[in-house]
Amino acid sequence: MAVLLWVGGVAVALLASSIKVLKEYEKGVVLTLGKFTGIRLAGLRLVFPVIQQMTRVDLRVRTIDIDKQQVMTLDNVPVNVNGVVFFKVRKPEDAVLKVQDYEYAIAQYAQTALRDVIGGMNLDTVLSERQKIGDEIRVIVDKETDQWGLDVQVIKLQDIEVPNDLKQIMSRQAAAEREKRANIIKSEGDREAAKNLAAAASTMAKSGGAMQLRTLQTLDGLGPTSSNTVVMALPVEVLEFFKVKGKKV
């Protein structure tokens, strides 16, 4: 009786351990006696203990950090760069059977590709073309990891750090560029103003009453305030009039 109870208990335990539940975003890679025998889909599945082994594989998009590392650019500037890889498993059997640890493998390969890509660019390109760098790294990593059943979707650079002394130089350079642009804009404005003044003077010279009209406009713009003191020069025509009158007298 005791033996039967023991056997029954063992049978129940084996049956309980053989029942596996796979979630909708998972697939199971099954090995029977060490040999690949199939893929289990989501739901309630039986995996016979001892003779079978099932590895769960998450099919959702996953992220892996590219650890911060120092990279020398093409113009010999050391920069510290890190990033993140977005990928998903496309073929679970390849991810389990062809590489020991696909997460570690893709992280290491992304680090190597990052060094190679940034090492072929100068500092200005690295700072301004993050998207381009990420795309180039993605192409390299995706091509290699395709045989592992992985699909690299996006690689983003997070931080690009340059030495402090170089930051100060870049800051002074940026300030000088802004001052240069301000001076150019001011000189262009002065040139346009000079053209306008020259055109106005030419117009007034061609019209006899233009100067007097401008004088009246200026006086009208001063307003009725009694505190304003106006010193007004007589037009040349008025002076000529009095000069002629004086000779006649």
Image (cartoon, rainbow, N blue to C red):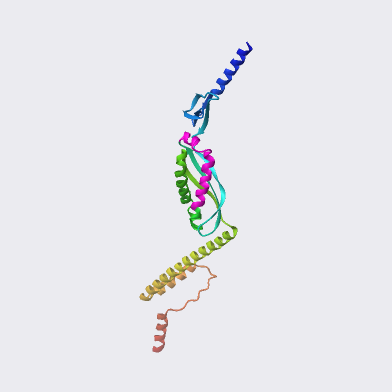
The relative height of residue 139 versus residue 221 in the rendered view (above or below) is: above
Instruction: Kindly give the residue lying farthest to the left in the view shown.
Output: 206
Q: Is residue 19 magenta?
A: no
Residue 69 is at least partly visible in this image: yes
Residue sitting nearer the eye, 7 or 136:
7
Please identify the quadrant where the N terminus is shown.
Answer: top right
Q: How many marks?
A: 0
Work out whether residue 100 or residue 166 is closer to the camera in this orientation and state it.
Answer: 100
Residue 114: say if magenta: yes
Q: Main secondary structure of the magenta part?
A: helix
Is residue 167 rendered to the left or right of residue 244? right
Question: How far from the left and from the top, in percent, is residue 103?
Answer: 53, 40
Compared to residue 235, the image places residue 79 above or below, namely above
Residue 13, picture quadrant: top right
Depth check: 78 or 205 in front? 78
- Give the percent coordinates (x, y) of residue 77: 54, 58
- Residue 186, given in percent of the width and then of the height, sits at 48, 67
Question: Residue drawn at (41%, 87%), measured in percent from left and top?
Answer: 246
| Span shown in magenta | 91-117
Residue 249 in sight from this viewpoint: no
35 horizontally vs 168: left or right? left
Say above or below: 11 vs 171: above
- In the rendered view, would you say 40 is above or below 132? above
Q: Quadrant of residue 227?
A: bottom right
Q: Quadrant of the C terminus?
A: bottom left
Q: For the point 44% across and 44% down, which residue is it?
A: 143
Percent coordinates x, y for residue 49 in the rendering: 55, 24
Q: Residue at x 55, y 55 (%)?
A: 79
